[in-house]
Image (tube, rainbow, N blue to C red):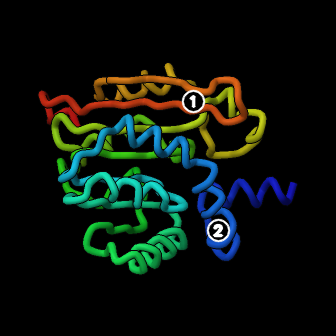
Amino acid sequence: MVLDGLLRSQFGKPSGLIGSLFLGPLMNVANMRLIDAAIDALGPRTRDVLLDIGFGGGFSLFRLAEKATRGKVFGVDYSPDVVVDASERIRLKRLDSRIRVECANVAKLPFPAGMFDRILTVNSIYYWPHIVASLRETARVLKPGGRISVGFRSRACLAPYTEGWEKFALYEPAEFARMMRRAGFKVLRAEQRDEWPLLDQVLIVGERPAERPEAF
C-alpha cells in the first residue's frame, strides 16, 4: 500500500531524490520507443516552434531539438523538481537558446494564442483535468493548421497496474479520438501498436482546422 501510494504520487508529480535519481531516468527508458513514435507521427520541421507538455524525464525535449535544428522547443511540466532537473541538463548541453522549460498546468498554458507549429505530449493525459477543456487549451496555443501528437498507453494495458488510483484517467484509442474531435481537432491518425505486449503504444494525431479559429 505504501509503495503503491509512492509510485502514484511520483508518476503524477516526480519530486525529490526519488524523482530526480530514479523516476526521471526510468521514465526516459520506459517511454523511449513511444516518444520516438509520437515524434515521428508529429513530423516536426526544421524551423518549427514546438511545445512538449509533460516532458517528465526530458528525453523528448532533446529529441525534438534534434528535429527542429533552426526552431525552438518549449516544455512545460507540472513538477517543479522535474523542471529544475531539465533546466540543468539543458544548460550542460548548451541548448539554452533553443530549449526553454517552465512549470505550468495544461489547463492554463502560459503562452499566447497561435504560438506553436506542433505540440507533443506523451504519457501525460492520464493526469489532465477536464480532458476536453485541456485539449481545447492546447488548440488555443496552436497555429491554424498546427498539429498535436498524443502518445499514451491504453486502458486495457494500464488498468491492471493502476487500479484504485485517483485522478488518473485511462482511455482507449477510439474514445480519446472522439474527445479530440469534441475539442475541435480534426483527427488525422489514430493507431494502436504492440497491443498484446506489456506496454502498448497508442498514437493520436490531431490538426487544428484553419477555419473558424474563434471556436478555440
In the displayed structure image, the side of residue 21 where residue 132 appears, left or right: left
Q: Point out residue 46 in the picture as x, y percentages from the top left corner.
A: 21, 51
At 33% across and 30% down in the image, what residue appears? 206
> Which residue is the extreme one toward the right?
1
* Circle nearer the N terminus (2, 1): 2
Please give the residue where the numbered disc 1 appears in the rendered image: 171
Q: Residue 215, position in %: x, y?
A: 20, 32
* Residue density around tag 2, few if under 14, some if 14–19, many if 20 or more, within 10 Å: many
Amino acid type at mark 1: Tyr
Residue at horizontal 61%, vertical 30%? Answer: 154
Q: Is residue 211 above or below residue 113?
A: above
Examine the image and state in which quarter residue 136 appears.
Answer: top left
- In the drawing, what numbered circle is on residue 210? none
Residue type at numbered disc 2? Gly
Q: Nearer the viewer, residue 98 or 81?
A: 98
Q: Is residue 94 left or right of residue 26?
A: left
Q: Position of residue 104 (x, y in %)?
A: 41, 62
**Which residue is located at x 19 percent, y 59 percent?**
70
Q: Position of residue 207 (x, y in %)?
A: 27, 31
For the C terminus, the image quarter is: top left
Residue 82 versus residue 76 in the image, above or below: below
Given this view, does label 2 or label 1 mark the residue nearer the observer? 2
Q: Residue at x 38, y 28 (%)?
A: 180
Q: Quadrant of the N terminus?
A: bottom right
Q: Quadrant of residue 95?
A: bottom left
In the picture of the structure, the residue carrying the numbered disc 2 is: 19
Separation of marks 2 and 1 at Cα, in angstroms: 25 Å
Query: What kind of element bears circle 2?
Result: helix
Instruction: Say which element carries label 1.
Output: loop
